[in-house]
Image (tube, rainbow, N blue to C red):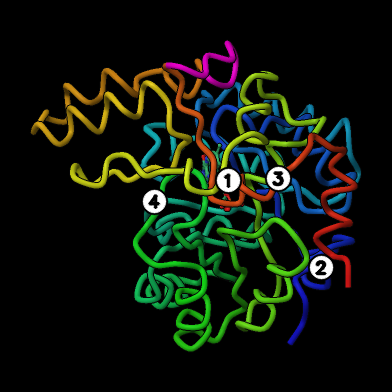
Amino acid sequence: MKKLNEILGTEFPIIQGGMANIATGSFAAACSNAGALGLIGVGGMTPEMLREEIRICKSKTDKPFGVNIMLMHPAADEFADIVVEEGVKVVTTGAGNPAKYMDKWKAAGITVIPVVAAPILAKALEKSGADMIIAEGCESGGHVGEMTTMTLVPQTVDTVSIPVIAAGGIADSRQVKAAFALGACGIQVGTCLLASNECPIHDNYKKAVVKAKGTDAIVTGRIGGTPVRVLKNKMTREYIKQEKAGADAMELEKFTLGSLRRAVFDGDTDTGSLMAGQTCGQLKEIRPLRDIFEELMRV
Ligand SMILES: Cc1cc2nc3c(=O)[nH]c(=O)nc-3n(C[C@H](O)[C@H](O)[C@H](O)COP(=O)(O)O)c2cc1C
């Protein structure tokens, strides 16, 4: 089996996960320059912003990079065209099936890698023409499914014949070895990169991630069907209270509206949404990206 770095032409078999409002062109370039595949995340961007961020990324690295497109984004069709026009070579997708873009992306030589939280969806995506699959377990930060990385990765490997990349709950070399043992060809990480010097989030957010224990990364929105893993704070306490009391989606929306931006840009750790996964409990300091990637790959 080929390793992810041999497939993508990167130094390490590591993808920096797309992160809404965080994964800018500069951050993706910094990740690519540090040896991984950097991704620009469209979450929080307009089509014009994506084009600009791709150009910034190209100006800062000559290494491979990609774009993460959330398919439920209202501008998904425009993003799908921009990646072709700008010559992007790798696209990861979330929240759905990118089948309708597949012909156009394949014709442009794009490697398409959807993110899944269930093996059955991986099978459908393989049929649609996906080149690889990212199997993301619910230990991860951000939107989560039900299965853990430990169960999802081997079941996905057994379901498809394309390469599988493990994501969720990986932040040091023990977990990387486990991912390979489960049959993955590489890994995708998000949470451990929040604790990097280069990550463009507010210092308060970084410090909260480093201080948090694994049990502080809880899931909100389970009842309403939009589960998201975030660090416990005033906002999550109130959200869960309202959710249990039967608040409807519109009422709950007011807690989350703009809350990731409040955490990322204003450093509001009380009412901001501090998305982070369970690996926060093993992050001890804020370090350069290169140190984080080297530690992940330590034998
Ligand atoms: C702050 C944050 C924001 C995220 N936003 C997105 C996103 O916009 N799109 C996406 O596909 N995944 C998103 N993710 C998931 C990551 O891309 C990645 O798969 C995940 O972080 C890997 O698990 P880990 O957090 O345990 O390292 C996000 C994760 C974090 C921590």
Q: Residue at x 78, y 37 (%)?
A: 285
Q: Which residue is mark 3?
A: 283
* Quadrant position of residue 48: top right
Disc number for residue 248: none
The image quadrant where one finds the N terminus is bottom right
Where is residue 268? Give x, y as percent: 52, 14
Ligand 1 near label 1 (Cβ, under 8 Å)?
yes
Residue 1 vs residue 263: left or right? right
- Near mark 2 (Cα within 10 A), the count class, few <14, some 14-19 or many ≥20, is some
First in sequence, mark 4 or 2: give its number.
Answer: 2
Compared to residue 237, the image places residue 114 above or below, namely: below
First in sequence, mark 4 or 3: give its number.
Answer: 4
| Magenta-highlighted residues | 263-270
First in sequence, mark 4 or 1: give its number.
Answer: 1
First in sequence, mark 2 or 3: give its number.
Answer: 2
Q: Residue at x 49, y 88 (%)?
A: 158
Tag 1: amino acid: Asn
Q: Which residue is mark 1?
A: 68
- Near mark 3 (Cα within 10 A), the count class, few <14, some 14-19 or many ≥20, is many
Q: Which residue is mark 2?
A: 5
Q: Residue at x 32, y 39 (%)?
A: 220
The image quadrant where one finds the C terminus is bottom right
Residue 91 vs residue 197: left or right? left
